[in-house]
Amino acid sequence: MKILFIGGTGKISTACSQLAVARGFDLALLNRGRRHTIDGAREIVVDVADTDAARAALGDEHWDVVVDFISFTPDDLRQRVELFRGRVGQFYFISSASCYQKPVRHWPGTESTPLDNPFWAYSRDKIACEEYLLAAMREEGFPAVIIRPSFTYDHTMVPLSLNSWHAPYTLIDRMRRGAPIVVPGDGTSLWQLTHNSDFAKGLLGLFGHPGAIGHALHITTDEVLSWNMAYRALADAAGVGEIDLVHIASDFIVECLPEHEGGLHGDKTESVILDNAKVKQFVPDYVATTRFADGIRRTVEWYDADPDRQTIDDAFNDECDRLVAAYRDGLARAKAAFKVNGANNEG
C-alpha cells in the first residue's frame, strides 16, 4: 500500500509513521524537513503550502492513502483537494474531538454528537474543515475520511489540564520542588489520555477499508481517569510523594488569563468520555494498551535521561504562582468575611 503523510514527524504522527514502516507500507513523508527523519520512510521535502512547489515535488504519483496531519483551516484543505484530486484512494483529515458540543450535554460522546464549540476558535476551524471536506465528497466524490483524536500524547508531552505547551518538563519540576500545582476545577472531571502508539494502531487499521470513506471516527483509549488521578500518576512517575494540588475554578483562571478559555471551557473543564465502538467496528482488533501510568512514566524517564531536555517555562511558572497567590488571598479574605458575619459553618 502506497501511503503519503503530510507531516509525519509530529507528536501524533511520528508513531503513525513508525508503525507504517513496521507494517511494510510504502511510506513517504511530505514536510519541510525541519524535524527528525523516520527510518524506512521516503522524504519529500517541500512546503506543502507552496502549491506549485508541492505539485512539482509530487510529480504524477498516485497514492492509496494520504493523511493530512497539518491542515487547520478550510483554505488549507482547499489547497490539498486541488493537489490530490484524482490521485488518492483515501484522504484522511486529522480533525479534533474538541469539536464536539460544549458544554457537554450527553455521555458518552459518539461521532453523532453535535459539532459545536463556541469557546475555541481552533475547534471551530476544524469543524469548518470537516464541513468543507464532506461537501467535496458529496459534490465531486472526493474520498474523505475524518479522524478526531482527543489529547493524544507522546514521550515528550505531559498531557495534563494546565501545563506549558513548549516546555512540558516545567510541571515535573514544579512537583519535585514542592511548588503548588494548579488544577482547574475540583479535579474530578473525567478524561481519556491516549498514547500516540495506540492512536496509530486505530488509524492504520482503517487504511484501505472501502467503507471508511465519508465517515468521521474518533480514536482514543478506553481508560478513563479524573484529572486528580492523572496528576497523581505524574507525581508517582516523578518519584514525588506529597503534591500540593490547588483546585481553582476554571472561570477564575479564565478571568485572570483569558488565553486559556479555549483549552479549558472549550475542552478540559468538561468530562470528555468518548465511545470507541465505531472505530472498533471498522478495526475489530483495535485496543489501546498503554495505561496512562505507563505512558507518563516513559515521559519522565525520557526527560530524566538528558538534562538538556529539562527546559523550564518561566512565564508559566509565574502564571501559576500568581494564580495561586490570588486564589489563596481571596480565600483568606472570604474566610475572614464569613467569620465576621457569623456565617462560618465549621463544626
Image (spheres, rainbow, N blue to C red):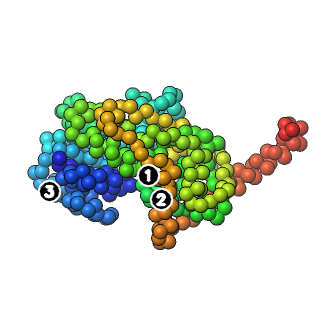
Q: Residue at x 28, y 61 (%)?
A: 38
Q: Position of residue 155 (x, y in %)?
A: 43, 58
Q: Residue at x 32, y 35 (%)?
A: 284
Closer to the camera in the image, 321 or 294: 294
- Residue bearing the label numbered 3: 56
Quadrant assignment, res 207: top left
The answer for how far apart the CA atoms under marks 2 and 3 are is 39 Å
Quadrant assignment, res 85: top left
Left or right: 166 as drawn, with respect to 233: left
| First reached walking from the N terminus: tag 2 or tag 3 | 3
- Residue bearing the label numbered 1: 153
Q: Amino acid at mark 3?
A: Ala
Circle 2 crowding by C-alpha within 10 Å: few under 14, some 14–19, many from 20: many
| First reached walking from the N terminus: tag 2 or tag 1 | 1
The answer for how far apart the CA atoms under marks 2 and 1 are is 10 Å
Q: Position of residue 274 (x, y in %)?
A: 45, 35
Quadrant assignment, res 150: top left
| Residue 222 sits above or below residue 1 on the image | above
Q: Position of residue 116 (x, y in %)?
A: 44, 33
Q: Amino acid at mark 1?
A: Tyr
Mark 2 vs mark 1: in front: 2
- Residue bearing the label numbered 2: 299
Q: Are marks 2 and 1 in contact (CB under 8 Å)?
A: yes
Mark 1 vs mark 3: in front: 1
Say the numbered circle drawn on residue 82: none
Q: Residue at x 12, y 51 (%)?
A: 61
Helix, strand or loop at mark 1: strand
